[in-house]
Amino acid sequence: MNRAENRYFQTAARMNRALLELLGEKGYEYITVKELCAWAGVNRSTFYLHYDGMADLLSETVEQTLQSLLDKFEERPEDFIRRIGTDERENLILLTPRYLSVYLEFIRENRAVLRAAYSNPEALQTRNMARDLTRHILCPIMRRFGVPEGDMPYYAAFYLRGAMAIVEEWLRSDCSRSDEEIAELLITCIHPVPPAEGEGWMQVIS
């Protein structure tokens, strides 16, 4: 990386930090480009050299924030995907307090930026995320549990949108309820009754 590229990325990093700091003080809709530039120590022309607008900056900040979630897991996503076809089915059940605790702690720690993202869905890129999650993780797991191919899109839609709705409601309350309460709520809502032997793919979460 040459000096110009390094300066470019350092400036972008300052603007990302500025947005995160300001989100800790006020709602995203109240943050202006002028205010953000003043915090980051850049001028407006520099801001627009990097971004089309505030939504573009928010999208980048959310992407970097979500990427940091992967660092919290011992197993890389690609390694988990590789073992879906051969691992014991009980190891593919991820809607458990052990897995959920990592996600919910992450959401709580990053609630300001995630709350802004939920209020601006284009920044969260939910369609792309849901498509990739369904294709690479949910559908292969559903096959292991014998879910008919034609039913998979409906199961995935119910599961993903329901889980996201619970998280969004939790964020709206500034994560006022405990992580443990929300984990129990997710498990209960998505799978309200104990599964019979060999059933229960809907305990899966990514």
Image: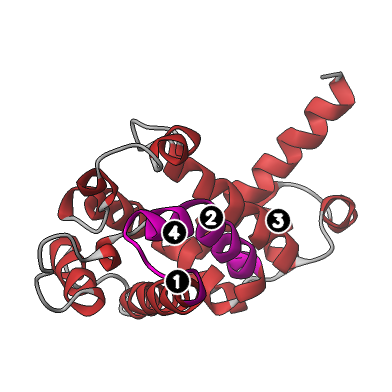
With 130 as the anchor, is 123 left or right in this view? right
With 172 as the anchor, is 56 left or right in this view? right
Q: Is residue 110 visible?
A: no
Q: Real-space Cα distance between discs 4 and 1?
A: 7 Å
What secondary structure is found at the residue carrying circle 4?
helix
> Between 103 and 85, which is closer to the camera in this rendering?
85
Q: Amino acid at mark 4?
A: Leu
Residue under numbered circle 4: 138
Vertical comparison of 49 with 185: above or below: above
Q: Are the two marked residues, 3 and 2, in contact with CB atoms closer than 8 angstroms? A: no
Label 1 crowd (10 A; few <14 / some 14-19 / many >=20): many
Q: Is residue 36 visible?
A: yes
Q: Are the two marked residues, 3 and 4, in contact with CB atoms closer than 8 angstroms? A: no
Foreground mark, 4 or 2?
4
Q: Earlier in the sequence, mark 3 or mark 4?
A: 3
Residue under numbered circle 3: 38
Residue 20 disc label: 2
Residue drawn at point x = 16 percent, y = 75 percent:
188
Foreground mark, 1 or 3?
1
Is residue 199 highlighted in magenta?
no
Foreground mark, 3 or 4?
4
Residue drawn at point x = 57 percent, y = 72 percent:
28
Q: Are the two marked residues, 4 and 1, in contact with CB atoms closer than 8 angstroms? A: yes
Residue under numbered circle 1: 156
What secondary structure is found at the residue carrying circle 1?
helix
Q: Amino acid at mark 3?
A: Ala
Q: Real-space Cα distance between discs 3 and 2?
A: 14 Å
> Between 203 and 29, which is closer to the camera in this rendering?
203
Q: Earlier in the sequence, mark 4 or mark 2?
A: 2
Number of numbered callouts drawn: 4
The C terminus - image quarter: bottom left
In the image, the segment drawn in magenta is 123-150
